[in-house]
């Protein structure tokens, strides 16, 4: 069974940084997509970053390019979302998600991942 567990959310001031962690387990396929999504109050869910293992394609949302970065720890099967220069509009619940399929994600994250983590809230105060 695939499990995704996020951690690292919290309250931060504008311009500050946070690092979110996603520990993934149970993925047995070599072809899958891992991603970070977020949903702000009253807004649709947005794909922030996704990576496909099948072709190496990667997507960053325009709203976070140059501020958010991904680090991987393959030994721990973990991905980290480093969020810098945070803005109030980054306030959202952040989710780690996985889609078990060989997909190209260069144009965007898959709309319907197969698996979701429980989410971790991030609040950026001004």
Image (cartoon, rainbow, N blue to C red):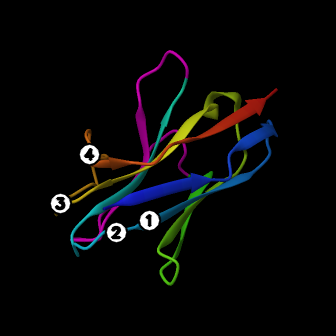
Is the residue 65 above or below the residue 41 in the image? below
Residue identifier under label 1: 24
Residue identifier under label 3: 101
Say which label, 2 or 3, has the lower sequence index: 2
Magenta residues span 41-65
Task: Specify whether 108 is left or right of 60.
Answer: left
Task: Specify whether 76 is left or right of 60.
Answer: right
Indicate yes or no whether the magenta region holds residue 7: no
Q: Residue 28, how many percent across, how many down?
A: 25, 73
Q: Residue 99, how many percent across, how many down?
A: 26, 54
Q: Quadrant of the N terminus?
A: bottom left
Q: Secondary structure at mark 1?
A: strand
Residue at x 62%, y 34% (from the top left corner): 90
Q: Are marks 1 and 2 in contact (CB under 8 Å)?
A: yes
Which circle marks residue 26 in the picture? 2
Q: Gap between marks 1 and 2, in whole Å? A: 7 Å
36, 100: nearer the viewer: 100
Residue identifier under label 4: 110
What predominant SS class does the magenta segment belong to?
loop
Mark 2 is surrounded, within 10 Å at the Cα level, by few (under 14), some (14 to 19) or many (20 or more) other residues, namely few
Say which label, 1 or 3, has the lower sequence index: 1
Q: Gap between marks 2 and 3, in whole Å? A: 15 Å
**Callout in the foreground (1, 2):** 2
Q: Gap between marks 4 and 1, in whole Å? A: 18 Å
Task: Specify whether 100 is left or right of 38.
Answer: left
């Amino acid at each position: 069974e695939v499990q995704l567990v996020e951690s690292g959310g919290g309250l931060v001031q504008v311009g500050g940084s946070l690092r979110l962690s996603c520990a993934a387990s149970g993925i047995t396929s070599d072809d899958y997509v891992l991603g970070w999504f977020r949903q702000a109050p009253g807004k649709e869910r947005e794909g922030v970053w996704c990576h496909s293992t099948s072709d190496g394609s990667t997507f960053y949302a325009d709203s976070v390019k140059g501020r958010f970065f991904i680090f991987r720890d393959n030994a721990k099967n973990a991905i980290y979302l480093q969020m810098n220069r945070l803005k109030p509009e980054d306030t959202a619940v952040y989710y780690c998600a996985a889609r078990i399929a060989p997909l190209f994600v260069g144009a965007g994250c898959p709309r319907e991942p197969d698996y979701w983590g429980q989410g971790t809230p991030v609040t950026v105060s001004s």
